[in-house]
Amino acid sequence: MALTSTSLKPTKATETLHAAKRRPKRGMAAWCVLFVLAVVLLLTLIPFFLAGLNAFKSAADYAANGPVGLPRELSFEGIISFWENVDFGNKLVNSVVISTAVAVSAVILSLLNAYAIGIGRIRGHRVLLALFMIGLTLPQEALVYPLYYLSKEVGLYDTKASIIIVLAVLQSAFGTYFVASVLTAFPREILEAAKIDGAGRLNILFRVVLPIIRPTLMVLGTFFFIWTWNEFFLPLVMLVSDSNQTVTQAMGTLQGEMTSDPTTTAGAALLGMLPTLIFFLIFQRTLTKGITAGAVK
């Protein structure tokens, strides 16, 4: 009996079975690595677990059951106490405004600098790139003294603008080096084709280069936001007024009178890490896509 073309065509189930057979089996080394990663993950989650567990206990409940006991009843005393004592709502708004402004400004600066260095190949671009590398290695302690007096001279001390400008410039040093390394390998054929079509430098930047490297810039902006949010030293020096301070500075008050109340400390820890955790969960697909696109390129 002659076989028809339909009977010879492999079904989807057959292809899946063959793919499963071709998949290499995990060896002992792979299982060991997986076990170590699982242990590291559990150790990383312990502080989050303890903060979440104790933030919803009352002081009496904590004293009776200890730090690892489950709460007998849901209490928001610690969270409310910390929120009201440090005016956490205002600190939260300040951190969001400063982190967003720094992330956007640093990405724009990085793109413009990298475009001139990576594609424009301006004179001395290697020297400029080396200077940006030096900027990456400078410790913040070495910058505090000049930044402090310079901001006072120009009237920006103790303003949000001062910390936004300083952090945007500092973080754009890394961004410039990162994006310039991407643009150096940008396909020249695409740029030449755009020039033949009559596109100017700005048109090439915004209509050709920007759409292609957008995932990379989104990853960069996400990291800038998180780094700025976690910044403590420079805001501590540049922002002295309570109305201008950020979430990390509010966490610094835990070194004072609140250390005797563990539920308030746990509530502060939970409030401090919750915004960055939410931000990461929102933009984790952007990070994955950007890193994958960079790996493919």
Image (cartoon, rainbow, N blue to C red):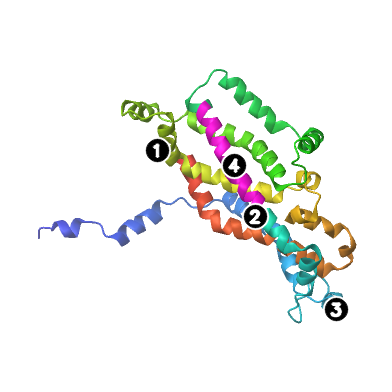
Magenta span main SS: helix
Q: Residue at x 40, y 36 (%)?
A: 208
* Amino acid type of the residue tagged 4 in the rendering: Ser
Q: Which residues are magenta?
A: 96-116
Mark toward the start of the polypeptide (4 vs 3): 3
- Say what amino acid the circle numbered 1 marks: Arg
Q: Secondary structure at mark 1?
A: helix
Which residue sits at x=51%, y=51%?
286
The first of marks 1 and 3 along the sequence is 3
Q: Nearer the viewer, residue 132 or 33?
A: 132
Q: Few, some or many C-alpha atoms within 10 Å of disc 2 (few <14, some 14-19, many ≥20)?
A: some
Point out residue 215 in the picture as x, y percentages from the top left corner.
48, 45
Q: CA distance from mark 4 to mark 2?
A: 14 Å
Residue 86 among those drawn in magenta:
no
The numbered dot on residue 105 is 4
Q: CA distance from mark 4 to mark 3?
A: 48 Å
State the residue in front, 270 or 207. Answer: 207
- Where residue 22 appears, x then y in whole percent? 40, 51
**Which residue is nearer to you in this view: 196 or 141?**
196
